[in-house]
Amino acid sequence: MIWHSFVSAAMYNAVVGIQGRYAPYRWNACGPRSASPAAAAAAAAHRVLLTYFPASKFRLETAYSASLAKIPDGRAKTQGLAFGERAARHIITSREGDGRFEPVAFTIPPAPGVWRPTPPLYKPFDSAWMGQLRPMLLASPDQFRPSGPPELTSARYAKDVNEVKAFGRKSGSHRSAEQTDTALFFTGALNIQEAMGDYAARHRFGIAETARLLAAANTVAADAVITAWDSKLHYGSWRPVTAIHLADTDGNPKTVADHAWEPLTNTPAHPDYLSGHATWGGALMRTLTEILGTPRVDLHITSEATHSTRHYEYADQYNRDVINARIWGGIHSRTASTIGNHTGQRLAAWALTHYFQPLHQ
């Protein structure tokens, strides 16, 4: 989502800087009204991608040439290309020193309830830098940080652990076949970019509407990931697999240790609270409902993990599945997923009142 946000923000500024209609993203430049917005969008995307992924130059140049071949040569194209380059340079410059890939240490000392590397690979905290990355829209990574996870001795904590223990285990679980399929569907990457592009094409969006949809969705989702990782760093709560293995150390009489317990899917190498997938999923769905003006999102989403496609008619259907999937997969507590999803939605509602607004012309 971080890279998608850079690209789509540059494309958005390139298009609305020529056509108007919507407020640019942290930029005031205007291009010639006679310029081609399609050429500007292509140039902006090409320049951003080439800057951050120089090893993919051949593929990028091939795709760029194919895009430009569809645009008639002439003054409009030339002007559009020049303005798109300007829009890209603005985004690239604005993201200098933003904290990408900076070393960030997890400093919470070991104790019951505190995250530690999980089996089978026992990898260290992955991508901790995202918790301190400068956001795209928010003032700081902790702007929407929620209150902490439940206390280890609480009834809510025990309920969370026991639910994952029963429904998220690799074998002998209470999951139905449909629940297993949902858990696996959300295990890998989802084709969200293609799904939004497909929506825009089927609903006959113009280039400015499409650019706005993608820029809003991707920048909000990026900030949702940053928000989730900020909470992971700040609270550092242990994963369900650790909670179940070490339940005899949590001081809660309603949890029982099972040292042989395994989750359905491998646990990612970062803390439980908040669930990144549920947080950015909530942010994405709220962004779409705000932009579209309806809870009907009508998305065809394909999972790289299962190679299957699901149609989500409404945002709440997606939110329900992404929350449940993390429990049924055995990798997140319900609290981490539910609070994450709600946090993402709150973040998106705020963002859409401050960015990507229609211009009154």
Image (spheres, grey):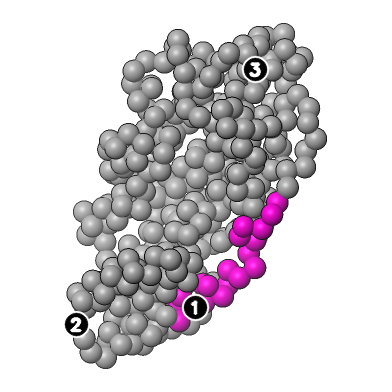
**Where is residue 212 drawn, in percent x and y?**
39, 63
Q: CA distance from mark 1 to mark 3?
A: 50 Å
Amino acid type, label 2:
Pro
Task: Look at the picture and state if 186 lies above or below 6.
Answer: above
Identify residue for label 3. 245
* Chain part drawn in magenta: 86-104
Q: Is residue 150 magenta?
A: no
Contact? badges 2 and 3 (CB < 8 Å): no
Residue drawn at (41%, 15%), measured in percent from left and top? 175
Q: CA distance from mark 1 to mark 2?
A: 24 Å
Side (left or right) of 13 relative to 63: right
Task: Look at the picture and state if 281 lies above or below 28.
Answer: above
Residue 274 is at least partly visible in this image = no
Side (left or right) of 311 relative to 29: left
Q: Secondary structure at mark 2?
A: loop
- Give whichever of discs 2 and 3 has the lower sequence position: 2
* Residue 89 disc label: 1
Q: CA distance from mark 2 to mark 3?
A: 64 Å
**Where is residue 345 drawn, in percent x and y?**
51, 44
Can you tell which of label 2 and label 3 is closer to the viewer? 3
Label 1 neighbour load within 10 Å: few <14, some 14-19, many 20+: some
Identify residue for label 2. 72
Q: Is residue 102 magenta?
A: yes
Q: Name the image quarter holding the C terminus.
A: bottom left
**Where is residue 53 drawn, in percent x and y?**
45, 65
Q: Secondary structure at mark 1?
A: helix
